[in-house]
Image (cartoon, rainbow, N blue to C red):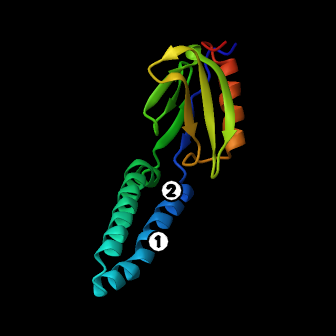
């Protein structure tokens, strides 16, 4: 087993965060003419529906910008592998290699996630999912690197 694995870090993906932010803002901008049409027609029911829709998407945009876009712009780390643990800054969680039973890559609609099963029940339950959508790199490559790092970690099994 290696004793001095160098930490491996993956920054936030600027492309994914920019696209997600642009999409959400685009939906809000697209809805503005409809909102104005309903205001002019004094259609309160439809007006309130569009306002609720816009507020939901504005909140989503703020969350994406604060949680993903700003860290991407600043070049911050999204995922770190070091001798002791796997750290997901997106999920704000550190997982000691000793606590990990299995690591799997599961595909979703828009991206994949690392699906980590724990040896024993933790505060996170029996598993945790770490989405890779906002992590720079190819999902399969990240997965293979995480698996290899755990296998060669001095604390891994």
Marks 1 and 2, how far apart in space?
14 Å
Q: Looking at the image, is mark 1 or mark 2 nearer the viewer? A: 1
**Among all residues in the image, which is located at the extreme bottom?**
40
Badge 1 is on which residue?
26
Rendered position, 34 above or below 142: below
SS state under label 2: helix
The residue shown at (56%, 15%) is: 99
Percent from the top left, x then y, of residue 151?
69, 19
Q: Please rate how many residues cluster around mark 1, counting C-alpha atoms within 10 Å: few if below 14, some from 14 to 19, many from 20.
A: few
Name the quadrant containing residue 42. Answer: bottom left
The residue shown at (52%, 15%) is: 121
Q: Nearer the viewer, residue 41 or 155?
A: 41
Name the quadrant containing residue 49. Answer: bottom left
SS state under label 1: helix
User: Which label belongs to residue 62?
Assistant: none
Rendered position, 69 above or below 125: below
Percent from the top left, x then y, of residue 12?
51, 47
Number of disc labels = 2
Q: Earlier in the sequence, mark 1 or mark 2?
A: 2
Q: Please rate how many residues cluster around mark 2, counting C-alpha atoms within 10 Å: few if below 14, some from 14 to 19, many from 20.
A: many
User: Which label belongs to residue 17?
Assistant: 2
Percent from the top left, x then y, of residue 18?
50, 61
Determine whether label 1 and label 2 are within 8 Å by CB: no
The residue shown at (29%, 87%) is: 40
Q: Nearer the viewer, residue 66 or 14?
A: 66
Query: Is residue 59 in view?
Result: yes
Quadrant, the C terminus? top right
The residue shown at (45%, 50%) is: 68
Horizontal side of residue 31 vs 140, given as left or right: left
Name the quadrant containing residue 105. Answer: top right
Q: Nearer the viewer, residue 31 or 92?
A: 31
């Amino acid at each position: 087993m290696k004793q001095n694995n160098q930490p491996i870090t993956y920054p936030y993906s600027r492309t994914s965060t920019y696209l997600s932010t642009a999409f959400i803002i685009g939906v809000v901008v697209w809805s503005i003419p409809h909102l104005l049409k309903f205001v002019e027609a004094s259609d309160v029911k439809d007006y309130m529906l569009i306002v609720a829709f816009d507020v939901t998407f504005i909140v989503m945009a703020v969350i994406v910008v604060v949680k993903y876009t700003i860290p991407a712009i600043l070049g911050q780390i999204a995922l770190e592998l070091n001798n002791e643990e796997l750290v997901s800054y997106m999920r704000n969680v550190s997982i000691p290699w000793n606590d990990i039973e299995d690591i799997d890559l599961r595909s979703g609609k828009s991206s994949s996630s690392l699906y980590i099963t724990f040896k024993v029940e933790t505060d996170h339950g029996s598993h945790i999912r770490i989405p890779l959508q906002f992590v720079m790199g190819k999902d399969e490559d990240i997965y293979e690197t995480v698996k290899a790092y755990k296998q060669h970690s001095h604390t891994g099994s």
